[in-house]
Amino acid sequence: MELRKNGGIVIPLVIIGMMFFVVGFALGINSYIVPLLESALEVSSGQSYMILAATFAAFFVFSYPATSLILRIGYRKTMVLSFAVFAAGFLLFVPSAQCRSLPLFLLASFVCGTANTILQAAINPYATYLGPIESAARRISIMGICNIMAWPVSPLFLSWLIGKSIDSMSLSDIIFPFYILAVIFVILGIFVWLSPLKEMKFGEQEEDLEGAYDDGRTSIWQFPHLILGSIALFMYVGIETIAMASSVDYAVSLGLSDPEQYALIPSIGMVAGYVFGIIMIPGYLSQSAALRLHSWIAVAGTLLVVLLPARMSVYAVAVVTFGCSVMYPAIFPLALDGLGKFAKTGSSILVACIAGGSIVPLLYGFLKDWVGSQAAYWIGIPCFLFIMYYAYCGYRMKKPVSPRR
């Protein structure tokens, strides 16, 4: 591939890193909107977490169309289009606030989720195949730092721009900031359009994959390690979204002052985990070994959250996110390994599984209404146990599944 032969991956990585930051910033807005809607519209936690459901539902609906769009117009044009959709979504938040309408907020979140789907469908495989597949986890970890650093920036930026803490805000206060965000994202789209980012085609990726199977498989569903990896990714995204996007709401439920400041806690754990992954993978730990280790850490962190005294448990969320940190960087390449000509379809399936951020947090929201925010974290245990199974056994299941007769 041209990018690899010329060794020119630094500038593309910087540009892609900026877009990973954009993804995190846009998702981090949810952590601000969820508790705001609970107080301003007087809705339940389950209803307010429908904002996350709307955002991540777009990944299920548009992941395959987004992949088809890349094949049709290329990576860079797809990225530029995503910024335009983001701007439209942010503008929809204005009438949502003016009308105090939960359905309009859900629509605005779904449009932003659509933009996020389009952008992630482009930047995830781009980062994965920008270098050797064996070091993909390291590259995605670097991108993950860019992504996670942006999550707490959203609530802090909005609080700074508005000049109020979230517990003293009204819906009308967010109107001007969302106009500003729409303008910023239009400018970023223009920047990507004018950037020196080189085009990459799916066909090039497939030729470069080592160990791609050529044993007569005719369907993507004949790759068990991809199917199991998709389930693992679904569960991982769901739990990570709870840890990252509910941090402000969790602090509010505990009655802590300046709750938006607690958005930093899960990010600290995530960034520390990403740095660990960059140092250790692949020199000291394989991608699968790192996934096994972090699965154990995530289980331990979840137990700390639910068992520690409430005001201490908020800090244990950082242990959960440390465990989560290498899961996406490890699962994505492990699940794609050896797909050959099925790489583009496999990638779209994995991106679709980001919809786990829709279902699992919604279940958490309703559990919170029933048992409280702390006990609701028990939902993480079965998810992390399945990811642990994939890390030990699931990724090895690469023998073809015989089609039914």
Image (cartoon, rainbow, N blue to C red):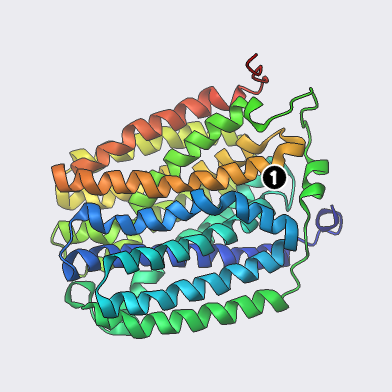
| Lateral position of residue 158 relative to residue 38, left or right | right
In the image, residue 231 sits, relative to residue 154, either above or below, namely: above
As helix, strand or loop, the secondary structure at mark 1 comes to: helix
226 sits to left or right of 314: right
Q: Is residue 285 left or right of residue 260?
A: right
Q: Residue 108 versus residue 312: which sits nearer the camera? A: 108
- Residue occupying the point 76% across, 36% down: 340
Other-residue count near label 1 (Cα within 10 Å), few / some / many at <14 / 14–19 / ≥20: many
Percent from the top left, x then y, of residue 12? 71, 64
Does residue 276 appear left or right of residue 312 in this picture?
Answer: right
Three-letter amino acid code at the position of disc 1: Lys
- Residue marked by disc 1: 344
How many numbered discs, if any?
1
**Which residue, as the protein is rendered here, is positioned at the far front?**
405
Q: Nearer the viewer, residue 239 or 97?
A: 97
**Residue 179 at x, y percent in the picture:** 42, 84
Q: Is residue 84 above or below residue 151?
A: below
Q: Is residue 188 visible?
A: yes
Residue depicted at 53% across the width and 36% down the height: 230
**Residue 128, percent across and down?**
67, 49
Query: In which quadrant of the rendered view does residue 323 lie?
Result: top left
What residue is drawn where x is 58% and y is 61%? 119
Residue at image location 34% in from the left, 73% down from the top: 156
Front-lying residue, 377 or 141? 377
Quadrant placement of the C terminus = top right
Q: Position of residue 14 (x, y in %)?
A: 65, 66
